[in-house]
Image (tube, helix red, strand yellow):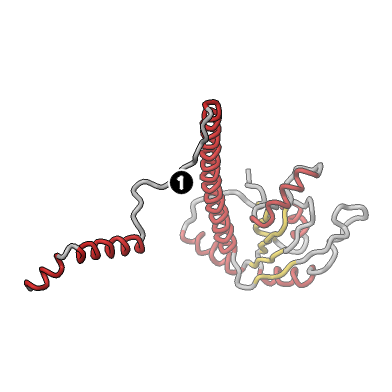
Amino acid sequence: MLPEGFAGPNVVKPLTPEALAAYKAAQDRAGVIYISRIPPGMRPSKVRHLMSSHGEVGRVYLQQEGARIQHAKRAYLRRKYTATKKPHFTEGWVEFKDKRVARSVAEMLNAQPIGGKKGTRWRDDVWTMKYLPKFKWNMLTEQVAHEAAIHTAKLRVELSQSRSEQREYLRNVELARVLEKRSQRKKEKGEEMVLKPHTRPGKRPSESEGDSERKRRRNDYEDSGLGTILGSIF
């Protein structure tokens, strides 16, 4: 079964040198168009069906709503407050076997209504597409993989930060509980609780503290007269 958003042949066979050369030649002849807006509810199979009426179509990929971080919140709210739970697609790429056909299709359909029979769902929607010169399908797969890796890395960082914040919050809650119990015991005994400032153990003195300490030792050294005696000797 194809992943969500893809529509195309899913047959993997080992390539002979002749088949590999033919595949590279076919890739050089192919052209890709970019659709900046996919009508709500339209799926990859429908896009393939509509584009196939204008030329031979290779592969089709539609970007699912919420795949990009800036669209994730909108996708979540739509699924939460609307009846339909099916994924929506925001943009797409269509590969034509002939780049000349792809260019002509993009020029012909751009800013034109989708059309169809009266009463169809997307009859009055408008195509917004552009031909991508010198753009090949492997560039798209690399871009999708790169964006997925970035998204995963950001989620990992956010999860780690959330865990550290949660641990800090629980530590503060536990500290507040202990201090509250200690304060209650002090009140029962009629004593007043005094909180001491918290200092980290093993903290190194700052430069200003070190300078003042060295100055104090030098003054004590001079007051003791040892400085004068050693000066007269040397």
* SS class, disc 1: loop
Q: Which residue is mark 1?
A: 197
Q: What is the tally of numbered marks visible in this picture? A: 1
Q: Residue 29, how many percent across, how many down?
A: 61, 69
Please tell me which residue lies in front, 83 or 192. Answer: 192
The quadrant the N terminus occupies is top right
Rendered-image quadrant of the C terminus? bottom left
Residue 131 at x, y percent in the picture: 69, 70
- Location of residue 129 (image quadrant): bottom right
Is 19 left, or right, of 70 in this rendering?
left
Residue at x 67% of width, y 57% of height = 70
Q: Is residue 99 above or below residue 141?
A: below
Q: Is residue 162 above or below residue 63?
A: above
Q: Is residue 205 left or right of residue 12?
A: left
The amino acid type found where label 1 is placed reads: Pro
For residue 223, side relative to residue 231 (left or right): right
The picture places residue 171, in percent across and down from the top left corner, at 51, 39
